Image (cartoon, rainbow, N blue to C red):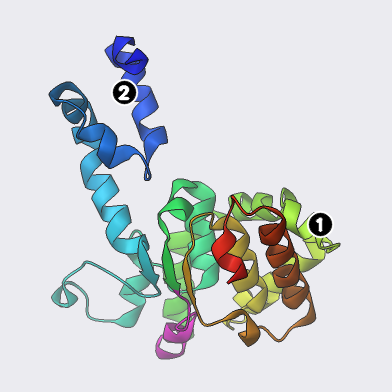
């Protein structure tokens, strides 16, 4: 095996790139590789728990560890809206590859239970340094370009929703452009009502049909 002939230091640098699809099989190859994979196991298991069967507000924290709903906004890997999941993917792209099943039905629902001052403070602490990374996802989106949608206009419309604490169809639709391994989606595409998100969804489906070796599940 050519990989086994590489220096240990180089193998350690390569291992994170096997997450998530090839990581477990690589770790079980032999004792040496298991040892090299061990430092990544906790992070892998944590991402798998939160994202493999994704739903908003999912946490592995004991509910006795927090008293208020706004505490959920501070938990690493707990997403409360499409935007918060986008921001997670923006800073850690591998997260998107973990998502096989997604239930997006509780997108932004928790915000109604959090007083505005607490909402703003918690979100600033959790997402304050991610804004530019999220913006670049839109600026570099081939899907928006193919859909004929101006990325800045699309992004700004999304941010109007986010800043008003509304569920954003723009964020929810764009999120689907980033999930290469998605197999099961709730709710269905028919739930999107706004013209720009509808146009983006149509483009996503067209690209999926043209590329049967990609995310063909989106066509079903």
Does 117 lie within the magenta span? no
111 vs 171: above or below = below
Is residue 41 found left or right of 17 in the rendered image? Answer: left
Is residue 207 found left or right of 145 in the rendered image? Answer: left
Does 105 lie within the magenta span? yes
Q: Which image quarter is the N terminus in?
A: top left
Q: Residue at x 72, y 56 (%)?
A: 210
Q: Residue at x 34, y 11 (%)?
A: 6
List the residue tagged with mark 1. Answer: 146
Front residue of this view, candidates 211 and 99: 211
Of mark 2 and mark 1, the one earlier in the sequence is 2
Q: Which residues are magenta?
A: 103-115
Is residue 167 found left or right of 81 in the rendered image? Answer: right
> How many numbered dots are placed on residues in this image?
2
Q: Residue furthest front?
A: 212
Mark 2 vs mark 1: in front: 1
The tag on residue 94 is none
Q: Residue at x 37, y 45 (%)?
A: 20
137 vs 190: above or below = above
Q: Circle 1 sits in a helix, a strand or a loop, which is it?
A: helix
Q: Are marks 2 and 1 in contact (CB under 8 Å)?
A: no
Residue 194 point in image, percent of width and height: 74, 83
Task: Specify the quadrant of the image occupied by residue 216.
Answer: bottom right
List the residue tagged with mark 2. Answer: 12
Q: Which image quarter is the C terminus in?
A: bottom right
Front residue of this view, candidates 157 and 121: 157
Q: Residue at x 66, y 83 (%)?
A: 192
- Asked whether residue 170 is in view, the answer is yes
Q: Residues within 10 Å of mark 2 (few under 14, many from 20)?
A: some
Residue 200 point in image, percent of width and height: 74, 68
Residue 178 point in image, percent of width and height: 58, 56
């Amino acid at each position: 095996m050519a990989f086994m002939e590489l220096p240990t230091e180089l193998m350690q640098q390569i291992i994170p790139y096997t997450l998530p699809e090839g990581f477990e099989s690589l770790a079980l190859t032999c004792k040496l590789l298991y040892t090299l994979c061990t430092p990544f196991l906790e992070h892998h298991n944590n991402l798998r728990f939160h994202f493999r069967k994704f739903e908003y507000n999912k946490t592995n924290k004991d509910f006795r560890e927090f008293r208020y709903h706004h505490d959920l906004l501070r938990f690493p890997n707990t997403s409360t809206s499409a935007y918060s999941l986008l921001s997670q993917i923006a800073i850690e792209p591998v997260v998107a590859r973990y998502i096989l099943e997604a239930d997006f039905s509780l997108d932004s629902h928790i915000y109604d239970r959090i007083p505005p001052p607490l909402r703003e403070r918690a979100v600033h602490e959790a997402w304050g340094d991610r804004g530019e990374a999220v913006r670049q996802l839109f600026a570099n989106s081939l899907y928006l370009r193919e859909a004929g949608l101006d990325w800045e206009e699309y992004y700004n419309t999304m941010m109007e929703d986010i800043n008003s604490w509304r569920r954003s169809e723009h964020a929810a639709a764009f999120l689907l452009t980033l999930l290469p391994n998605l197999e099961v989606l709730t709710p269905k595409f028919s739930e999107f009502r706004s013209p720009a998100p509808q146009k983006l969804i149509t483009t996503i489906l067209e690209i999926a049909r043209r590329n049967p070796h990609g995310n063909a599940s989106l066509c079903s």
